[in-house]
Image: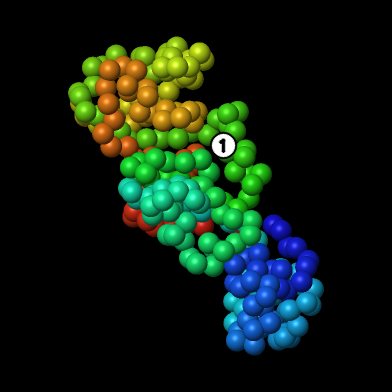
Amino acid sequence: MPNSYKRVDAHLSNLGYCSRGEAKNFLKMFRVCVGDERIFDANKKAYHNDITVDDEPLDAESLVILMNKPSGVVCSHNDAGVLIYSLLPIRWQRRNPKISTVGRLDADTTGAILLTDDGVLNHKLTSPKSDVAKVYEATLAEPIKGDEVDIFASGELLLNGEKKPLLPAKLEIINPTLVRLEICEGRYHQVKRMFAAVGNRVIALHRVSFGDFSVEDLKPSEYKVISQ
């Protein structure tokens, strides 16, 4: 686990406790200690793991968060609307580097999404070479025909406007208009485009899991730290 050595004001600002300019006042207002010694010098250098604020350890230097994204929330730092980051604690919103989503879900899509400030991990999980399984539940406008299971599993389905067929995907029929689909790619609007390719339309989409992490025990907007 990281245990960086740097100035206390850098620790505090990077983790979102305060800005560097606010650090001096922060040390007056809160009991910041290095080991057992309370400090008032924001320039003092220390290891992350040795610092406490009001007897609590500093937040982790890197976070991976699993959230059950609700409908109507946007996975962006800049777009209009309710941003997904507004559902996190204010301190986490001020971290540097910023916490970002691992990929995106459409505003009307709900369910499992990871957020992290680890850029290397984010790139790894969103890389086209990543084979992380993602499971979706899709509500369809029309009843399933039955041949979709074989079509999706064939590895030959070609999406409109693309030259490379999709990798095999596993489709489970729950009822005629509700299905569970497991894919290991992350192409643009992939699930919706897959059903469009077989003459159907997705009217509601929920991602049940991302890799090993499921949101079936999380209510909408709830989240938990899964790595730090």
Provide the secondary structure element on which disc 1 rests. helix
Residue 5 is situated, as x and y percent measured from the top left of the image, at 78, 66
User: Left of 136 or right of it: where is 119?
Assistant: right
Which image quadrant: the C terminus?
bottom right
Q: Name the residue under label 1.
A: 126
Which image quadrant: the N terminus?
bottom right
Q: Which colour scheme is used?
A: rainbow
Q: Does the image show residue 177?
A: yes
Residue 185 is situated, as x and y percent measured from the top left of the image, at 50, 28
* Residue positioned 39% across, 40% down in the render: 106
* Residue positioned 53% across, 62% down in the render: 93
* Residue positioned 68% across, 72% down in the render: 20
Above or below — where is 65 with respect to 153? Answer: below
Residue 219 is situated, as x and y percent measured from the top left of the image, at 33, 55
Callout 1 crowding tier (Cα within 10 Å): few <14, some 14–19, many ≥20: some
* Residue positioned 50% across, 51% down in the render: 77
Of residues 131 and 22, the one nearer the viewer is 22
Amino acid at dot 1: Thr
Q: Does the image show residue 155?
A: no
Instruction: Specify the quadrant of the image occupied by residue 124.
Output: top right
Of residues 53 and 42, the one nearer the viewer is 42
Residue 138 is situated, as x and y percent measured from the top left of the image, at 30, 33
